[in-house]
Image: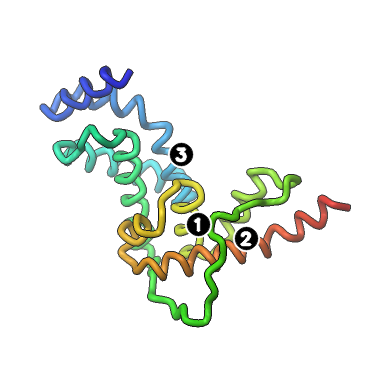
Amino acid sequence: MHHQHQSLIERCKTGNQVAQMQIYDLYAKAMFTVACRYLGNEEDAKDAMQDGFLKAFLNIESYRPEAAFGAWLKRIIINQCLDVLRKNQLQFNDIEVSELKIVDEDDWNFDSNLTKNDILKAVEQLSENHKVVVKLYLIEGYDHSEISEILDIPVKTSRTHLRRGKLKLQELLKPKYNAARY
């Protein structure tokens, strides 16, 4: 499979449109899911995904086989979604963090009575800034230095948005947890 992907990618580098369509067909569903996660609106997600694929094919020379092609493409799609959000006035500002305590960022244990859907619905209720950072960290698996680079914000701002998003999630999910217990 890996050799077949590499062969397709090499053909894409020469501008082979058949290979580009094959790559598109292999990754479109997953990339659409990623785009929907950030934009919510299917039409915006389709547009961002299409633009992301176009950017990927135009810049495919910069792809290095040391990284998984899907991860490289996913980062382009996420950046495209963030561009859409920025156009819609999403702004990340440096946050005053002196009064905040560092909490265990790896402790994302939710009550076992909560479903994945409950958690995802709660994430959607977060403010846009917190939602984007929580999704990049929790769902996509990026660390703070990567989030900082993607969003062009300081690492401490990423940490603060994550902490505040996590606290808000706990607050939003508490009623569900209490209702499930009784």
Proximity of marks 3 and 1: CB atoms separated by less than 8 Å: no
Is residue 47 left or right of 167 when viewed as pictured? left
Sequence order check: which comes first, mark 2 or mark 1?
1
Residue nearest the observer in this picture, 172 or 43 = 172
For marks 2 and 1, give the CA distance: 10 Å
For marks 2 and 3, give the CA distance: 22 Å
Vertical position of residue 52 compared to residue 110: above or below: above
Q: Can you give x and y, in whole percent of width and height, for residue 165 in the image?
A: 55, 64
| Quadrant assignment, res 178 | bottom right
Write down the residue under mark 1: 134
Mark 3 Cα-neighbour bin, 10 Å: few <14, some 14–19, many ≥20: some
Q: Amino acid at mark 2?
A: Leu
Residue shown at 34% from the left, 34% from the top: 70
Q: Can you give x and y, in whole percent of width and height, for residue 20 in the image?
A: 23, 27
Proximity of marks 2 and 3: CB atoms separated by less than 8 Å: no
Residue at disc 2, secondary structure: helix
For marks 3 and 1, give the CA distance: 16 Å
Residue at disc 3, secondary structure: helix
What's the mark number on residue 25? Answer: none
Q: Can you give x and y, in whole percent of width and height, for residue 68 in the image?
A: 31, 34
Is residue 4 left or right of 36 when viewed as pictured? left
Write down the residue under mark 2: 169
Residue shown at 59% from the left, 60% from the top: 125
Is residue 35 left or right of 138 when viewed as pictured? left
Vertical position of residue 143 compared to residue 7: above or below: below
Mark in the foreground, 3 or 1: 1
